[in-house]
Amino acid sequence: MQRHLAEFNFGTLAYPWDDPRIAGFQNAIAQVNAIAERSPGFVWRLSDDDMEATQEDPAGPLADRPNTASTLSVWEDAGSLYRFVTKTLHARIMRGAPDWFVPGDSGFLVCWWVPAGTRPTVAEGMARWQSLQRDGDTEDCFGGRRLKSLSLAV
């Protein structure tokens, strides 16, 4: 069975979406997403409209996390995701994270393997992240350190 790598990442913005103090982040989102979609190994990401609806759903998986910025995507392998995160505009933009996100509440990342063709949900991503927080890296989910080691092992 062929498998792909799902990833969910999120953080809480320090200011409301329309606040000029996060304009650098807001202005970069479309460009970073476009780079991701053109990157080798990219498979799919949850659309902006669907992510926004999930973030604003008062009964949804992010209901207890107002002002969240998040991404849910699928990649062919760990190396493809890791290269996108560390070797593209994404890395440069995320250097501004301390100015845009609540201290200690940003850059949360969880990865897990899915059968090729699977489109995970934000609810699944949050459940995987909670599992990662509770149990650490497992066969079912893992964080950034294991992502890096898997990408370097290729």
Image: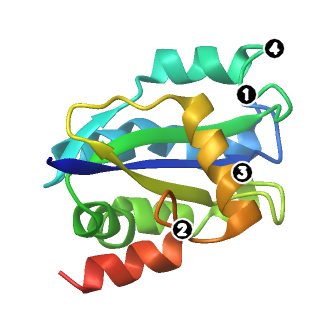
Can you say which quadrant of the picture contains the C terminus? bottom left
Image x and y of residue 84, in percent: 30, 62
Among the two numbered marks 2 and 4 on one chain, the one whose residue lies closer to the N terminus: 4
Residue 18 tag number = 1
Res 88 visible: yes
Marks 2, 1: nearer the viewer? 2
Question: Disc 1 and disc 4: Cα gap in Å?
Answer: 20 Å
Q: Residue at x 78, y 34 (%)?
A: 67
Can you give x and y, in whole percent of width and height, for residue 149 in the image? 37, 84
- Which is more foreground, mark 1 or mark 3? 3
Asked if the residues shown at circle 2 and circle 3 are in contact, with their CB atoms under 8 angstroms apart, the answer is: no
Residue 107's mark? none
What residue do we see at 23% from left, 62% from top?
80
- Between the residue at mark 2 and the residue at mark 1, the CA separation in whole angstroms equals 38 Å
Residue located beneath label 2 in the image:
138
Q: Image check: 154 left or right of 74?
A: left
- Pair 4/3: label in front: 3
Q: Residues within 10 Å of mark 2 (few under 14, many from 20)?
A: few
Residue 23 visible in the current orientation? no
Q: Secondary structure at mark 4?
A: loop
Which residue is tagged 3?
Answer: 130
Q: What residue is pinned by disc 4?
A: 58
Query: In the rendering, at what x and y percent does residue 75 appear?
Result: 26, 50
Mark before the other along the chain sequence, 2 or 3: 3
- Give the spatial CA distance, label 4 vs label 3: 19 Å
Q: Earlier in the sequence, mark 1 or mark 3?
A: 1
Given the image, on which type of amino acid does mark 3 rest? Gln
Amino acid type of the residue tagged 4 in the rendering: Pro
